[in-house]
Image (tube, coloured by chain):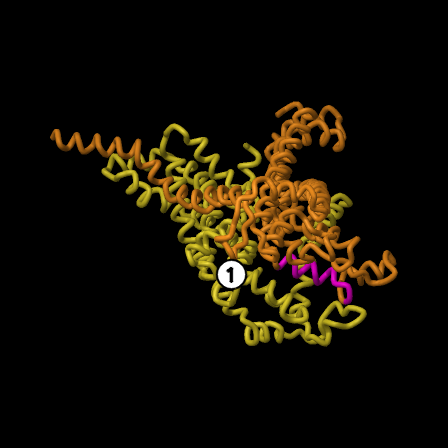
Chain colours: A yellow, B orange
Amino acid sequence: MKNFIFKYFLIFIWLAFILIPYIWMFITSIKSPNELYVFPIKYLPSKPTFEGYILLLKSTPFLAYMKNSIIVALSTVIIALFVAILASYSFSRFDYKGKTPLSFIFLITQMFPAILLAIPLFLLMKSLKILNTPYSLILAHSTFAVPFSTWMITGFLNSIPKELDEAAQIDGCTKIGALRHVILPIASPGIVAAAIYIFIYSWNEFLYALTFTSDIKARTIPVGLHTFMGEYIIRWDLLTAGGIITGLPVIIFFMFIQKYLVKGLTEGAVTG
Amino acid sequence: MLLERNKKEFINKWEKRVLPFLLLLPAFILILSVVAYPIGRAIWLSFHDFNPLKPFESKYVGFENFFKILKDKVFFIALKNSLIWIIGVVSFQFIGGLIGALILRQKFKGRSLIRGISLIPWVTPGILISIMWMWMLDGNYGIINDILLRLGLISRYIPWLAQKNTSLFSVMIADIWRGIPFFAIMLLAAMEAIPEQLYEAARIDGANSFRIFIHITWPLILPTVIITTMLRIIWTANHMDLILIMTDGGPGYSSLIIPLMAYHTAYKQLNFGYASALALLQGVFLIIIVSLYLRLLRKKGGMY
């Protein structure tokens, strides 16, 4: 019995450690400004209010940033997913020389400091005349999302028995036909998981968004919120409300796919 | 009939020799243009004096940018901070992660849900983590000051992020918090791959939990520990979003790390050449750290 209580006590501490910052942020976002800046701190709002959220949406360009974020993230998902599916089909279903070094190149892209690439990429985007447009971010995000999503999808394809596409080929399907009609439908949970991973990556990405965009036309939410810190005297009610709106979709999406993502992540590390 | 066979042979050849590479082509076009080309350009830039507003006035300066780094006092401050940042963050993440993994390994209700929740900080945007921690660490209304004051650990509110001797350390706390759950989940997965019989045998032999940990769990999770720590070192060294947002390297240079210095050099001083040299050095520096780390473990563990 004592052990039992101790066990749940430890789990409670662990959850509190993770969740308290989020809870505190949420409480802050529903406090009215005159309860926010008092000494000593008031832990619970006497009158919860969503004024911060309304003010954020009405009087700041937050919605424009959100639109940019959605455009960039969804386009990135479509492009990166298409590219990653083709690449993982190649890794999973064909035998050829140089497969290992080729897949190694994929992983190496993750090793470089983002700042090293950001500087020349800035010049590249400038000469392509796509600085401060969603295209620059879509291009960069797609590229950096491809390696991990390829890795994830390859894992899924490998778990589908090869006999299935062989059977389809005997029935007259080409390799591409087998991919479209047989493999993709079976692998769809894995593809959805990869899509959500790509979405989260693009939605959260900060450094490239900061360097490639300069105004409301293309700024995504993370950079938009960052500019709030400089432009206004820090308005914590607005910032925390913005933070909640930004984090919520990511966390909800993540909870749907966490099983697959954790599997993909840990399998690589445990067996590698 | 013959035609039919030729066609089949053709398709066969095409599917074996051409198709797999064709499938990889889009990925490689992206990687070549967005990763390989920029690396080449960064190397080129680091040997030039280059201002993006006057691109045609750029000139070749040889190793001058690198010599300048060695004479730059700010660089050595950033180097010291980078080392403190990497070593401090990764080791505390590891310790916290190990404790977390040991907690989560027990059998309890709602296990998979709690594991999912544990990874939330890992997918939370850096901007949100920064907002959360800036607000908690705030010098006037921060909850951390309030709690520490109530516990009698401090005698007055401390502006954690705004004073030189606490700024780096405070951002490190936020980054350590963000990384602990990730570490915990990775170590947990490694622990679960250990066959239950090993534990049973040890228990029959009368080993206590501490000895079981030292002689069974630890050696078997060591490969995962090594890989995860290495990935974490690379990640921590390169990702500067929290520092950039929370202190922007300040006050003064008290929380400046090398990649942030490169960022400032590029976008505030518009000195792309010097910034690229700094970023390149950071890459080399990272390769050295990772290989030293691997060598150290190879000597100690004798398993790699």
Q: Position of residue B294 (x, y in %)?
A: 64, 30
For this view, does B301 lie left or right of residue A262? right
The quadrant of the image that shows the C terminus of chain B is top right
Q: Position of residue A166 (x, y in %)?
A: 30, 34
Chain hosting mark 1: A
Q: Is residue B130 magenta?
A: yes
Magenta-tinted stretch: B128-140
For this view, does A122 lie left or right of residue A27? left
* Disc 1 residue type (three-letter): Thr
Q: Residue B287 versus residue A47: which sits nearer the camera?
A: B287
Q: Quadrant of residue A160?
A: top left
For this view, does A46 lie left or right of residue A87? right
Q: Residue at x 70, y 60 (%)?
A: B134
Q: Position of residue A128 (x, y in %)?
A: 41, 55
Q: Is residue B53 above or below residue A104?
A: below
Q: Residue at x 45, y 61 (%)?
A: A133
The quadrant of the image that shows the N terminus of chain B is top left
Q: Position of residue B143 (x, y in %)?
A: 76, 62
- Can residue B21 be spotted in the picture? yes
Q: Is residue A12 magenta?
A: no
Q: Residue B268 versus residue A118: which sits nearer the camera?
A: B268
For this view, does A86 lie left or right of residue B197? left
Q: Is residue A149 above or below residue A272?
A: below
Q: Which residue is mark 1?
A: A213
Dominant SS of magenta comes to helix
Dot 1: element: loop
